[in-house]
Image (tube, grey):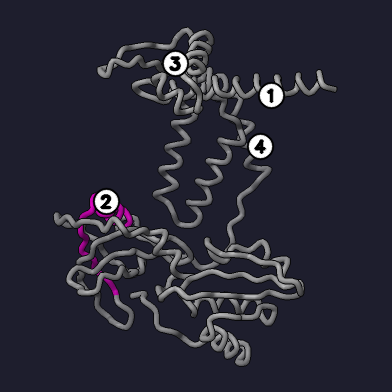
Amino acid sequence: MKCLNHYSQYDSMRYERSLQVLRLALAMRRSAIGVTLDDICEMFEVTERTAHRLRNAVVELFPQVESRLGDDRKRYWRLPQSTAELLVDVTADEVAALETCRRLLALNGYGEIATQLEGLTEKVTALIAPSVTRRLEPDVEAVLEAEGVAIRPGPRPGRNPAVIDSLRQAIKGCQMVRLFYNYRGREESAEIEVEPYGILFGSRHYLVAHRRGRQDPYLRMYSLPEIQRATVLNKAFERDASVSLQAFADRSFGIFQEAPRRVIWRFSGPAVRDARHFLFHPQQQVEELPDGRLQVSFEAGGLLEMCWHLFTWGPSVEVVEPAELRELYRHCLDQGGAPPSLPGQEV
């Protein structure tokens, strides 16, 4: 038994070292300038002596490895592009996964992103040897047919590709944008200038921006379907480095931006099983209670949308905190309908 254990450990070490050699070869292939011994030491957390051994193993396996002395007097090693097919084996499942994502994006209205993903797929397949590509084609079709792509029917917000392109250009370049925006309750669109920070995609899509000229520092959301035109201005703005678009989104349960509050829900009965596998909020905490109920807690604003969602769980969920949401949800259940409106920061 001792000999078998020794062999198993030795075999495991050989397997790990083989993976390190392959990873190093891929790193030499990806880098335009190559990798140094210092890079290898940092990549695998090994000594310089082990880094020499790994480098020698790659050179022995791939004689095409190129070596040069850099301006920093360090030696760099890289693999030319012609060795890509020797290092990477693209499977039918992986190509099918890209195509599935492309179809899902296109069917959900993300046409421009789907087009970019289509271009990426073409680049990936172009790197594969023609003989392998011919073999993959029927396999990819078989995987797509077996998996299928079903899209849940229902209303989806309209999106203007020209507006999206302009907003993306402005966001990446930190340039101000002039919006021709339809405010709710107004017949004519207003002309406003904003500093765009990002776009929130979901069941409804919004531009997150700061209104130039407003005294308050708060970001606000502008419904994309209500933006008639977006013109990128030759005016730069300094993006607040402390602002995180994801953190902004996490402040709320939905799209209404309110001050975050401590939220505690308790699920009972058959709902416990479903709630256990449900992601209500990225920072949620889930606790199994002694009486069999499931407690979910997180911090967020957006009480109105929480109430809309809780209504789908019926009496199987108890709102512990906050009190305002508890009263709102009780009213909703008593009336047997949708909750009343609450003010939010959507414009």
Is residue 210 shown left or right of residue 45? Answer: left
Q: Which mark is residue 12?
A: 1
Dot in front, 4 or 1: 1
Q: Which residue is mark 3?
A: 82
Q: Residue at x 24, y 62 (%)?
A: 195
Q: Amino acid at mark 3?
A: Ser
Q: Residue at x 47, y 30 (%)?
A: 124
Could you say whether the residue bearing mark 4 is in a helix, strand or loop?
helix
Is residue 169 shown left or right of residue 48? Answer: left
Q: Which residues are magenta?
A: 164-182
Judge whether 189 appears above or below 52 on screen.
Answer: below
Label 4 with label 3: CB-CB less than 8 Å: no
Percent across and percent down for residue 102 are 50, 46
Could you say whether the residue bearing mark 3 is in a helix, strand or loop?
helix
Q: Which callout, 4 or 3, points at the residue further toward the start of the chain?
A: 3
Q: Which callout, 4 or 1, points at the residue further toward the start of the chain?
A: 1
Judge the density around disc 1: few (<14), some (14-19), many (≥20) Cα neighbours within 10 Å.
few
Label 2 with label 1: CB-CB less than 8 Å: no
Residues at marks 4 and 1, CA–CA distance in whole angstroms: 36 Å
* Residue 271 visible to the viewer: no
Q: Residue 223 sits in which quadrant?
A: bottom left
Q: Amino acid at mark 2?
A: Gln
Residues at marks 3 and 1, CA–CA distance in whole angstroms: 31 Å
Q: Amino acid at mark 1?
A: Ser
Label 2 with label 3: CB-CB less than 8 Å: no
Q: Which residue is mark 2?
A: 169
Q: Which callout, 4 or 2, points at the residue further toward the start of the chain?
A: 4
Could you say whether the residue bearing mark 2 is in a helix, strand or loop?
helix
Judge whether 39 appears above or below 313 on screen.
Answer: above
